[in-house]
Image (spheres, rainbow, N blue to C red):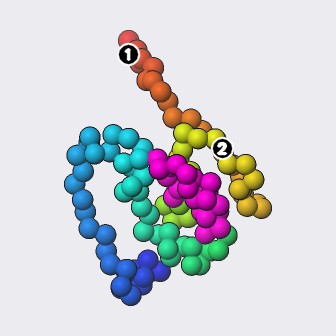
Amino acid sequence: RALAAARAAGGGVPQPRLWRPEALAGWSAVAAVAANDFESVVFAARPDVAAAHAALAAHAAHDAAAIVRMSGSGATVFLVTDGDAPAGVVPSGGAWVETRTATRVAPVLAAG
């Protein structure tokens, strides 16, 4: 309801876009168009989520390919970067989980 109210108050409804695959070939291109419509609504209602996002965004400010977003409707705030993990930016009560993107795909053998 909060998102619908924000859109009715002038936020507008996002318009669909058609992207060619080569336009999103690198993380900097993805970062330029990454968005989550719930962020403004959730940040207004949950300052702790807004603070977590701001802390990661400050860490990533020097990296044009970094992506800082809130997942879905606010369960997680995440940072995609090829840089170092941010030290000391996780708010009290939060947790930092580091993952890695696969650089290759393992072959899969069919059973039978």
Give the magenta part as a residue range.
50-69
Q: Which residue is mark 2?
A: 85
Residue pictured at 64% horizontal, 41% vertical: 84
Above or below 26: residue 33 = below
Residue pictured at 38% horizontal, 49% vertical: 30
Residue pictured at 38% horizontal, 87% vertical: 9
Q: Is residue 49 visible?
A: no
Magenta stretch contains residue 87: no
Residue 22: image quadrant is top left
**Residue type at the position of mark 1:** Ala
Above or below 7: residue 22 = above
Nearer to me, 15 or 106:
15
The residue at the far top in this view is 112
Measure the C-alpha gap from mark 1 to mark 2. Answer: 38 Å
- Residue 110's label in the rendered image is 1
Nearer to me, 45 or 112:
45
54 with respect to 40 (left or right): right
Residue 33: image quadrant is bottom left
Give how far across and how far down residue 102 sits, in percent. Answer: 49, 30
3 with respect to 15 (left or right): right
Residue pictured at 54% horizontal, 44% vertical: 81
The residue at the far right in this view is 92
Q: Mark 2 packing: few (<14 Cα in 10 Å), some, or many (20+)? A: some
